Image (spheres, grey):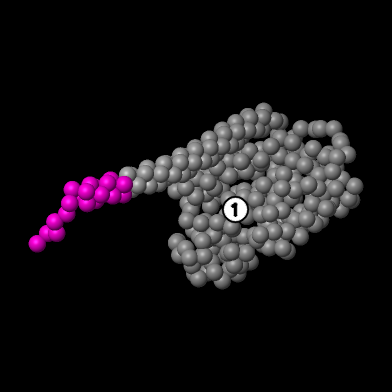
């Protein structure tokens, strides 16, 4: 049988209920306001990042279009025909990436954006070599990829520092030292997460290199892209062409210091260094994006 209560007791119960209800509403409104602030901050941050990304994309596209238009106007020369042809080949490879990347996942589109900058850098180097400029005395040893390499390997970091130390116009053996060290950094970056044994386990019948034994570099690049969740053929072809483009630049650089091309001036040396540096950054982005738990595909 329900307990009888007095009007005063009933009033106290109602007041207590209303207080608890008011407190609950206050707490809910406080939590909701805090949540809305967090959501707004997250949305604002996302929008800032999108705007910054779009600005970079527009900048890269404008720079690429300008450098390609300039390259088209350049006269072909026997001296730099390899670099010029290589830059055009890279632009062709990028065009396939650009045509397909809208259908790719987020990681694939991120790498495609970097590929656009790489293509612009390649054309910029070709234009610099085809345009005679005056000599300067400013140094070119500063770098912007210390963090990218140091977090991957102290040895790679030291090799790149050695390459930068060598690229001094007063060093009579600058080309050989710089090219040797930079080439080793590129090769080791790829091999670091794509050793032959791992690639062969994922794809036993993969293509081999010229010696018929070592795994072909294109297969290693495809393996790394798969581990990034971005195993797109056009992107793999671009990255292989990009490495070839840099290797061709090394050959030209060696000729420039010791051969008939003559010594490069500081602006050209800086352009060459930036081209190699950004390519190393591009590869390090691929290597750092490897997911250890991702299964090989293809």
Quarter of the image where one finds residue 103: top left
Q: Picture coordinates of residue 227 (x, y %)?
A: 50, 60
Q: What residue sits 71% from the left and 48% below the top?
A: 144
Q: Residue 149 or 217: which is nearer the viewer?
A: 149
Label count reads: 1
Q: Secondary structure at mark 1?
A: helix
Q: Is residue 53 visible?
A: yes
Identity of the residue drawn at 25% across and 49% down: 12
Image-based side of 144 in relation to 255, left or right:
left
* Image quadrant where one finds the N terminus: bottom left
Residue 19 belongs to the span the image colors magenta: yes
For the C terminus, the image quarter is: bottom left
Task: Look at the image and say whether residue 180 sits in the magenta stretch.
Answer: no
Name the side, left or right, on which 200 lies relative to 8: right
Residue where numbered disc 1 is placed: 285
Residue 248 visible from this viewpoint = no
Prevailing secondary structure of the magenta residues: helix
Name above or below for residue 271 compared with residue 210.
Answer: above
Question: Percent from the top left, x then y, of residue 95?
Answer: 53, 39
- Binning the other alpha carbons within 10 Å of mark 1 as few (below 14), some (14 to 19) or many (20 upward) gives some
The residue at the point 77 percent across, 42 percent down is 270
Query: In terms of depth relative to the viewer, which is nearer, 198 or 248?
Result: 198
Give the answer, above or below, for where 269 lies relative to 219. above
Q: Quadrant of residue 85?
A: top right
Residue 123 image position (x, y, % from top left): 66, 38
Q: Give the residue furthest to the left.
A: 1
The span shown in magenta is: 1-20
Q: Residue 5: horizontal and vertical position, in percent?
A: 17, 54
């Amino acid at each position: 049988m329900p307990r009888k209560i007095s009007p005063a007791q009933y009033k106290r119960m109602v007041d207590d209920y209303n207080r608890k209800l008011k407190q609950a509403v206050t707490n809910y409104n406080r939590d909701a306001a805090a949540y809305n602030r967090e959501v707004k901050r997250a949305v604002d941050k996302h929008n800032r990042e999108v705007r910054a990304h779009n600005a970079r994309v527009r900048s890269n596209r404008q720079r690429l279009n300008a450098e390609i238009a300039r390259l088209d106007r350049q006269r072909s020369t026997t001296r730099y025909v390899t670099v010029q042809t290589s830059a055009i080949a890279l632009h062709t490879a990028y065009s396939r990436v650009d045509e397909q990347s809208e259908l790719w996942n987020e990681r694939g589109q991120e790498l495609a954006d970097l590929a656009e900058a790489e293509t612009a850098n390649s054309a910029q180097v070709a234009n610099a070599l085809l345009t005679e400029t005056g000599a300067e005395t400013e140094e070119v040893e500063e770098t912007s990829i210390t963090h990218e390499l140091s977090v991957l390997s102290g040895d790679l970091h030291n090799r790149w520092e050695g390459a930068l130390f060598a690229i001094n116009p007063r060093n009579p053996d600058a080309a050989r030292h710089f090219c040797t060290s930079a080439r080793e950094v590129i090769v080791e970056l790829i091999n670091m997460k794509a050793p032959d044994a791992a690639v062969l386990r994922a794809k036993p019948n993969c293509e081999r290199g010229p010696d018929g034994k070592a795994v072909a570099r294109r297969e290693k690049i495809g393996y790394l892209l798969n581990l990034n969740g971005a195993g797109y053929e056009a992107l793999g072809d671009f990255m292989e062409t990009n490495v070839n483009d840099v290797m061709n630049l090394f050959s030209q650089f060696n000729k420039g210091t010791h051969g008939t091309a003559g010594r490069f001036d500081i602006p050209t040396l800086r352009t060459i260094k930036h081209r190699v540096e950004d390519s190393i950054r591009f590869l390090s982005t691929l290597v750092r994006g490897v997911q250890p738990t991702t299964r090989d595909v293809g």
